[in-house]
Image (tube, helix red, strand yellow):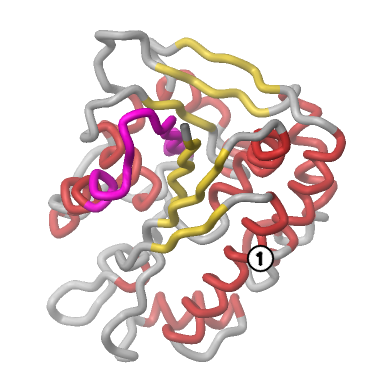
Amino acid sequence: MRWIFLSPHPDDAALCAGGLIFDLVRSGAAVEIWTVFAGVPPTEDLSSFARHMHSKWRTASARETIEVRRREDSKAAELLGARASHFNFLDAIYRNNQDGTALYADPVGAALDLLDAMLPAQICDVLVEGLRRDDRVVTLLGIGNHVDHVLVRRAAELLRRPLLYVADFPYILKHSESVVSGVAGMTSTLRPVSEAGVTAWIEAVCAYRSQLEAIFDRLDPGASVRDYCARYGGVRLWARPPGGTTGGLDSAPEA
């Protein structure tokens, strides 16, 4: 049996569950991180929003950005003892209208654009190709409603198999009130994280050097992770009872 953590972007799985991943590996489990939106755009004719994000990440082009982020992701997975896989779907910042403008002025909190309507099914098809019957699949709740997080949750739920859900960190720090709607009808289990797991979690998060300033602003990444783990007692996993229906954040509005 493998644990498969679905990560919308290079960094999400390590951010949200790095300590749990480390402890699972240390207990003998096989863990893989599948990063969905890690594709290289076919052109460098980018929207102003994408160029703005590159400036924050201090990267010069889309290809360089994806190469840097994939390397960071592989390093973080190595620190946690997991295997990293990267899919070729384009990050929201690279998905444009026909006129070249970005689909989203900001993908965090945005309504899903109709041009993204087929993405969950397309992502699901790719997931099905790699999944085994006894894999345990973990996806994000979509707290904060980043469109890519919502799309991956929808894709996971199209698999029609048992899922585990984990909160989106650090979005949960600003949107804790949305957890209630996001986990409606679910049960949860708290997975404590060992001290070694917390240390590895922080090291993995800090491996995403291009992202740290954008994610944590002026906050210390290590202190933020440690405080989050201490506040919640570890990593909480939610599950839907057999026969339960989907709902909550995966029903985010469409434009």
Q: Which residue is mark 1?
A: 75
Vertical placement of 44 versus 190: above or below? Answer: below
Answer with the quarter of the image where residue 240 lies.
top left
Q: Is residue 204 left or right of residue 48?
A: right
- Residue 64 at what x, y percent from top left? 50, 86
The secondary structure type at the circle numbered 1 is: helix
- The answer to if 144 sits in the magenta stretch is no
Question: Residue at point 16% right, 46% down?
Answer: 121
- The answer to if 128 sits in the magenta stretch is yes
Which stretch did the figure color magenta?
126-143
Question: Residue at point 72% right, 27% down?
Answer: 234
- Residue 26 at what x, y percent from top left? 72, 37
- Residue 182 at what x, y percent from top left? 41, 25
Is the residue marked by circle 1 packed among few (<14), some (14-19), or many (20+) residues within 10 Å?
many
- Residue 34 at what x, y percent from top left? 44, 52
Question: Residue at point 18% right, 53% down?
Answer: 122
Q: Is residue 189 left or right of residue 47?
A: right
Answer with the quarter of the image where residue 16 lies.
top right
Which residue is at the front of the view, 7 or 141?
A: 7
Vertical placement of 32 versus 104: above or below? Answer: above
Name which residue type carries label 1. Lys
Which residue is at the front of the view, 59 or 79?
A: 79
